[in-house]
Amino acid sequence: MSIQVYTFDCDGTIINSGEDIADCVNAALKRFGYWEVATNELISFTGDGAKNLVLRALARSTKNRFNLDSDYNKSQFEQVYKYYLELYHKNPVVKTHLYAGIKELLRVLKAKDKKVVLFTNKPESIAARIFEKLGILEYFDLMVGPETKKADGNPIDLKPSTDGLEFALSELNKRFCTSYTNDNFIMIGDSDVDIIAGKAFGCKTVGLRGGIANKEKMLAQNPDLCFSVASEIEKFIDMLSDDKCDDFIKNYAMQNEVPIMQDEGSDFICDYIKSHGVKSVLEIGTAIGYSAIRFAGLASDIRVTTIELDDERYNAAVKNVSEKGLSERITLIHGDALTAEIKGSFDLIFIDAAKAQYTKFFEKYKANLSEGGVIISDNLSFHGMVEDLSLTHNYSTKKLVKKIRKYIDFLKTNEEFETEFFKKGDGISVSRKKVRS
C-alpha cells in the first residue's frame, strides 16, 4: 500500500478556525434576537456542515426548544443560516491561523511529488479564500466540498459520506493520467466523520487529537494512526510511500507516537558523520533507538553511547538495538541525562531530548567533546513555531518555544563555541569549539 494522495480535512486539521466560526454564529444569533452560545460549545458543534452547526446553535440558544417543525422556525433558520454564511464569507480570517508545521508539511509533500487534496464539509470557496490569505492555496491539487458537483450535476454528499473521496479519486486520475486506487489515499482529520468516511472508502486514516472536533468521538472510530497535529506525519512520508516497508522501528514510532528525527535532519547528521570521519557519538535522548541505530549502522567502527529516561522507550530501544545486531556497538544507558555521569570523549554529541533543558545538556556534556568534535542540536525550528510564535495558541507550547529561542541565543552568543544553523529537518545547529590564536 503506497500512499500517494494526502487528503486533509480543513477546520481542526489545516486551520484552527473555531473562534472565527463561533464569533460569526453568535453574531447571526444576536442579529435575529437569540441568546449567544459559549464559544467552546459552538466549536464542538462543527464537523458535519454549516447547516448542522447553525441548527445546533439555535437549539442550544433556545434550550432545545428550537426545531424545524413549523414554517416560522424554518424561516428563522434560513435567515440565521444565510446571515451566518454572508458574515463568515466576509470575515474568514480574523483569528484563524494555521496549525504548527502545516505549511512545511505541505511543502515537503509537494517536493516528494505527492498529491494534496482538501475534503471538507466547509464551503470550499471560503476554504480557498482562507488558504490564499494564509499562503497555502498553491499546495493543493484539488479542493472538494459541499459546492463540488458530481458528474451527474448533483452536489457531493457531506462527510461521513465517501462521495468526496470517490470524486477526488476519479478527478485526480483524469487530471494527472494516474491510476490511483483507494489504497493510495490517506484521510487525515480531527473528527469522527473524517475517520468514518476514510474507512468506508477503504483508505488509511489519521486521527488528530489536537483539533477542534470532539476527540473522544473521533478516537472511538479507531483511526489507523493518531497524532496530536497533522504535521507530525511528515516524519513518516517515506515509510507510507513504500509498498514493502519493513522498518519495524519507524512503524513502532508511528503507531506509538514516539518522537523520531525527520528524515532530512537524520540524513544531514549521517552525512556529517561519514564526511568528517566521526567514530564516537554520544546521544542525549535515545527514544526507541532509531537515530542510534542509523548512526552505528554507517560503519563497523562507529560506537554510539545513548541515554534515555523513559522506561518504556528505553526497553523498546534495547529490543530494537538487539534485533539489529548492534548491541556491541551501541551502549544504552537508562537514566536522567542531567544527573548521569558519562565518561569518555566523543567526536559528536547529539542533543535531542527535553527541549527546555538544552542549555543544561550543552553545558554539562561539552567537557566530553573530543578535540575537533561538534555538538549537534535538533528541533530548533519546532514545526516553524520558533520563527513564528503565532502558530500556536497553547500556553505551555509557547513557554517551550521561548526556551528554545533562549537556547538559540545562548548558542549565538557563546564565546567558547561557534555555531552554524541549518534549515534541515526541524532545524539543526552544529557547534564546535573556537580555535584560540
Image (cartoon, rainbow, N blue to C red):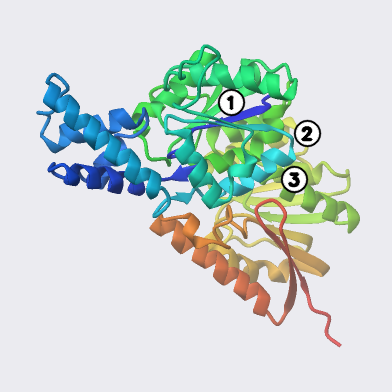
Classify the position of the C terminus by image quarter: bottom right
Q: Position of residue 358 (x, y in %)?
A: 59, 64
- Kind of residue at badge 1: Ile
Q: What secondary structure is marked by label 1?
A: strand
Horizontally, residue 149 falls left or right of residue 42, namely: right
- Can see residue 146? yes
How crowded pointer 1 is (Cα within 10 Å; few <14, some 14-19, many 20+) is rated as many
Image quadrant assignment for residue 354: bottom right
Which residue in the protein does label 3 denote?
330
Q: CA distance from mark 1 to mark 2?
A: 34 Å
Q: Position of residue 261 (x, y in %)?
A: 66, 46
Horizontally, residue 92 falls left or right of residue 128, namely: left
- Kind of residue at badge 2: Gly
How crowded pointer 2 is (Cα within 10 Å; few <14, some 14-19, many 20+) is rated as few
Classify the position of the N terminus by image quarter: top right
Residue at 58% x, 55% y is: 382
Residue at 53% x, 45% y is: 131
- Can see residue 1? no
Which residue in the protein does label 1 denote?
186
- Residue 377 is tagged as none
Q: Nearer the viewer, mark 1 or mark 2?
A: 1
Q: Nearer the viewer, mark 1 or mark 3?
A: 1
Rendered view: 407 above or below 216: below
Which residue in the protein does label 2 denote?
325
Picture mark count: 3
Image quadrant assignment for residue 252: top right
Please state which of residues 278 and 356 is positioned toward the viewer in this rendering. Answer: 356
Please state which of residues 228 and 357 is positioned toward the viewer in this rendering. Answer: 228
